[in-house]
Structures are given as structure tokens and as C-alpha cells.
Amino acid sequence: MTRHARSRRLASILDAVGNTPLLRLDGIAPSAPGVEIYLKLEFANPGGSVKDRPALRMVQDAMKDGRLTPDKTLIDSTSGNTGVAYSLIGAAMGFRVALVMPKNVTKARKDITQAFGTELIFSDPMEGSDGAIRLVKKIVEQDPEKYFYPDQYSNPSNPLAHYYGTAGEILDALGDRITHFVTGLGTSGTMMGTTRRLHEHKPRVFCVAVEPAEALHGLEGLKHMASSIVPPIWDDKTPDEIMPITTEEGWDMADKLAATHGLHVGHSTGANVAGAVKLAERAQRERGGGCVVTIAADRGDRYFAPLKWERRYVW
């Protein structure tokens, strides 16, 4: 007899944020047969990415203390996923949203945010996410009474969403079995909040931050910290290790996950899983086993047309 999980009844789409599943990636690291690798499917959030968690926490905390009121427009800089989350939340809760993003972010992200009625303001594509940060600050300085600027890069509610949510769910599902955690650096909120909670667990979990190996890279959403504006919420002493992953490793792993596991994920997720595999291989050598958890930040359809990482060059 087939047993069915009890379906939840929701009062709002926002009640669907969190409680995402963990998927075991069997066969992804054949050289580490004694190590379990789990992928937390954050694309199962209603906005389609891990960013639903911090966006909702930042909005809720700001409404509680009066920083966000019905007469204000929420404005922030984003490369896409947080913007989708803000847009969904704004539509569900009834406040206006404006987003500053590089002009070259994917068409899918522009279309999704505008579908919720969000105003888009484009920054110089050559300046990347740092250019969007500079532009949004200039806009807010010119009219501070009009806007609520959550500033996802410096807002403590960002990592708190992962401290209480993401990490708590991982521990609830795996308990003492988890030995390692790895995720990429964008705002760094996922790494900072989850790591702080996992470091408090006994036994302590070894936590690794993945970042692009090069300043010029094709891992959208991830930051090469040495060449970027460093988010104020980032503390390089929090992770136990910082692991560089190349663009090719991230893209290749994303392709592999689609072909072998039916998972069509973004390239930052590919980088996360590539890092998880390296950790698993190390755990196999050093301790004979373990349990590694990483994050599926979003789906691959967020990156459709036109976006291509060129591997061959003609000079």
C-alpha cells in the first residue's frame, strides 16, 4: 500500500517558505563510497531559490520595528534571486518593490520580477553586483524618506534566517550524522548563518565556504571576495576553510547533475556540489566516511538565454 505524506494547508504563499527537502546524491562521488552527500533543495521555496528565506526574514523584522511601512517602497540591489523573493513577498503583502540590478542579468529574472509589478532600475553591466550596490545607495541617499533599503549584504536578518531555518532543518533531518557543510559565497548569508548554528552542534560540523577561483568568473551569484566589495555580514574567520572552485568545475557539475540525477540547477549549485564532492573524497581518505550537506540555491531555468561561458578563445 502506498503511503502519502499529509499535505499542508497554507494561509499565504509565504507560509511555503522553508522546510525544503534534502536529497541524497547517490553515485555523485564514486571514489567516496563511505560518505553520504545531501543536497538541500532550496529551489522548492515558492520564489524558486534559497533567497526566499532571508528576504522574508528581513521584511518581517523591518515591519516589526517600523522601518518598513505601507507608504515606503522596498529597494535593494540584487543579481536576481533576492529580487524575485522581494517581488513575490511585496505582491503577497501589499507593498511596492524596486530593484537595482546589472543590465546583463538573465532575461528570465527580469521577466519574473516584473510579473509581480516590480520596478527595475539597471546598473552598468560591466560593474557587476558591486555597481548595483553603489547605484542603490546613491538612489536611497537622494530620497531616504521614500525607500526602505534592507541592504541584504549588511542586514543581520539575512544570516539569522539561515541560523534558525536552514541549519535547524538540516539538523532536524540528519542530527549527529552530519560531519561537513559546504556552500558558496554571495551575500555570504547562507554560509554565515548556517555555519554558526552547525558550529554550536555537538559534535561540531566542519564548514567550508566555496568561492570562485578567479576574479573574472562565470558563476553567477557567487563573489570572489578578494576582488569584490566585501559584504559587512561576512567574517572570514567563521568558516573552517575557503575552497576555490573554477567556473568549469561549477558548470560541468551542473551538467552532470542534470544528466545523471534529473536535477536542472544553476551553476552556483554546481559549484556547491563540486565542493561537496571534494570534501567527500577527503573525508573518505581521512576518516573512512562521513556526511556532507550542501545547498541547491536555485534551478537552471533562471539562467536561460542568453548566457554562455566561453571555454575556447581565438585572439
Image: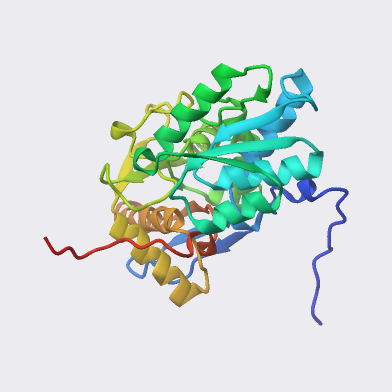
Residue 112, percent across and down? 63, 55
Provide residue 222's location: percent of width, then percent of height.
41, 44
Residue depicted at 75% across the width and 18% down the height: 65
- The correct choice, above or below, for 66 with respect to 244 in the image is above
Left or right relative to 57: residue 224: left
Q: Quadrant of residue 277?
A: bottom left
As drawn, 51 above or below 197: below
The color scheme shown is: rainbow
Q: Position of residue 110 (x, y in %)?
A: 56, 52
Query: Toward the viewer: 254 or 295?
Result: 254
Number of callouts in the render?
Answer: 0
| Residue 282 visible in the current orientation | yes
Give 37 or 156, whichever is nearer the viewer. 156
Q: Can residue 190 be seen in this view?
A: no
Q: Is residue 308 left or right of residue 55?
A: left
The residue positioned 74% from the left and 40% from the top of the image is 90
Residue, x 60% and y 56% (percent of image)? 111
**Residue sitting at x 37%, y 56%:** 280
Relative to 241, 46 lies left or right: right
Q: Quadrant of the C terminus?
A: bottom left
Q: In which quarter of the image is residue 225?
A: top left
**Which residue is nearer to you in this view: 290 or 135?**
135
Name above or below for residue 173 compared with residue 215.
below
Q: In this view, does 204 lie to the left or right of 99?
A: left
Residue 240 or residue 295, whichever sits in front = 295
Quadrant containing the N terminus is bottom right
> x, y (%) of residue 235?
42, 26
- Which residue ends up furthest to the bottom in the rendered image? 1
